[in-house]
Each structure stands twice: as structure tokens, then as C-alpha cells.
Image: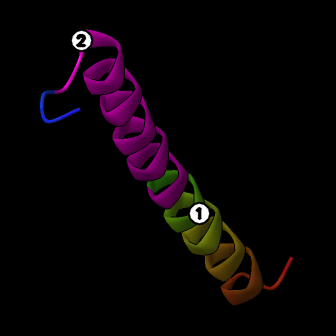
Amino acid sequence: MPYHRPFDILVFLNVQMYTIGTQLYVDRLYHTILSLLADPC
């Protein structure tokens, strides 16, 4: 099909949001681990 159905666009946006969310979560987790390692508890 040459045209995108609305469902396909929703799936595409969902995947994009999921990918961005995963990158942000990994980034936050990485910084949290670094800060924990940097602080001698």
C-alpha cells in the first residue's frame, strides 16, 4: 500500500516514543549508577 493508514502512523509514533523513553531511562539509570559509585557511602 502506498499510503499510510492511521493505525500504521499510531504504531510508528508509539515505537518512536518507546525508543525515546527507553533512551532517557537508560541515561538516567547510568547517571544514577555513576553518582552512587562516585559517593563513598
Residue 26 lies in the magenta stretch: no
Which residue is at the front of the view, 20 or 40? 20
Secondary structure under tag 2 reads helix
- Classify residue 27 as left or right of residue 8: right
- Classify residue 2 as left or right of residue 8: left
Residue 7 lies in the magenta stretch: yes
* Circle nearer the N terminus (2, 1): 2
Residue situated furthest right in the rendering: 41
Q: Which residue is mark 1?
A: 26
> Mark 2 near mark 1, Cβ–Cβ under 8 Å?
no
What percent of the width, then of the height, locates residue 40? 80, 85
Location of residue 4 with respect to 22 vertically, above or below: above
Which residue is at the front of the view, 10 or 28? 10
Q: Which residue is mark 2?
A: 6
Q: Residues within 10 Å of mark 2 (few under 14, many from 20)?
A: few
Location of residue 18 with respect to 23 vertically, above or below: above
What percent of the width, then of the height, locates residue 9? 26, 24
Q: Which residues are magenta?
A: 4-23
Give the quadrant of residue 41. bottom right
What percent of the width, then of the height, locates residue 15? 44, 39
User: Which residue type does callout 2 highlight?
Assistant: Pro
- The residue depicted at 23 percent of the width and 32 percent of the height is 1
User: Which residue type does callout 1 highlight?
Assistant: Val
Q: Residues within 10 Å of mark 1 (few under 14, many from 20)?
A: few
